[in-house]
């Protein structure tokens, strides 16, 4: 099991925006929504394009390559051309630090 890694300070990522990070060699995008922070694998399951370059609307992110949409909270593909979900990482806030755990290899 991987350790928790600090990826941002609380408030560093503006509400409704995201930050791309690398953890253990994996591209991850961290989102700040009204109810907290969420993290997804930073790759659209349709065309291997960075979701961190996409458009955040509410609790969804739209890939700017072909318009696939994903739930930021669950990783579910909610609009084609993507049909496969994207991996969601555990996120927590501890002492003002946004931390995530890269569990891809667990």
Image (cartoon, rainbow, N blue to C red):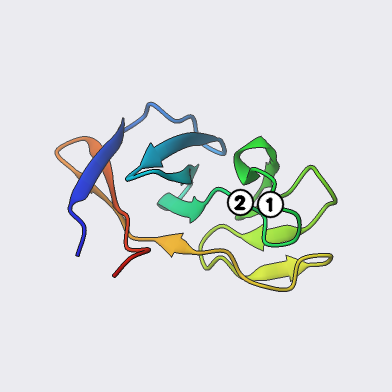
Q: Residue 88 location in percent, x, y? A: 46, 62
Q: Residue 86 location in percent, x, y? A: 57, 64
From what the image shows, is residue 10 above or below residue 77?
Answer: above
Q: Which callout, 1 or 2, points at the residue further toward the start of the chain?
A: 2
Q: Measuring 67% from the left and 36% from the top, which residue is drawn there?
A: 53
* Quarter of the image where one finds residue 23: top left
- Which label is found at residue 48? 1
On the rendered image, what quadrant is the C terminus found in? bottom left
On the rendered image, what quadrant is the N terminus found in? bottom left
Count of numbered tags = 2
- Which label is found at residue 97? none
Query: Quick one: SS at disc 1?
Result: loop
The reply to whether discs 1 and 2 touch (Cβ–Cβ < 8 Å) is yes
Q: Measuring 49% from the left and 44% from the top, which residue is drawn there?
A: 31
* Quarter of the image where one finds residue 91: bottom left
* Quarter of the image where one finds residue 85: bottom right
Which of these two is toward me, 22 or 30? Answer: 22
The crowd level at tag 2 (other Cα within 10 Å; few <14, some 14-19, many 20+) is some
The crowd level at tag 1 (other Cα within 10 Å; few <14, some 14-19, many 20+) is few
Query: Quick one: SS at disc 2?
Result: loop
Q: How many angstroms separate mark 1 from mark 2 (CA)?
A: 5 Å
Going by the image, does 17 lie left or right of 54?
left
Q: Residue 25 location in percent, x, y? A: 38, 43
Q: Residue furthest left?
A: 95
Q: Residue 105 location in percent, x, y? A: 33, 65
Q: Measuring 81% from the left and 45% from the top, which residue is drawn there?
A: 65
- Which label is found at residue 43? 2
């Amino acid at each position: 099991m991987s350790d928790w890694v600090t990826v941002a300070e609380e408030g560093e990522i503006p509400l409704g925006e995201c930050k791309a990070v690398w953890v253990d060699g994996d591209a991850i995008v961290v989102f700040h929504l009204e109810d907290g922070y969420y993290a997804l694998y930073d790759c659209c399951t349709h065309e291997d394009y960075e979701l961190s370059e996409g458009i955040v609307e509410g609790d969804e992110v739209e890939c700017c390559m072909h318009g696939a949409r994903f739930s930021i909270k669950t990783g579910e593909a909610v609009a084609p051309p993507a049909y496969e979900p994207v991996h969601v990482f555990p996120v927590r806030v501890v002492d003002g630090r946004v931390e995530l755990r890269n569990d891809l290899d667990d």
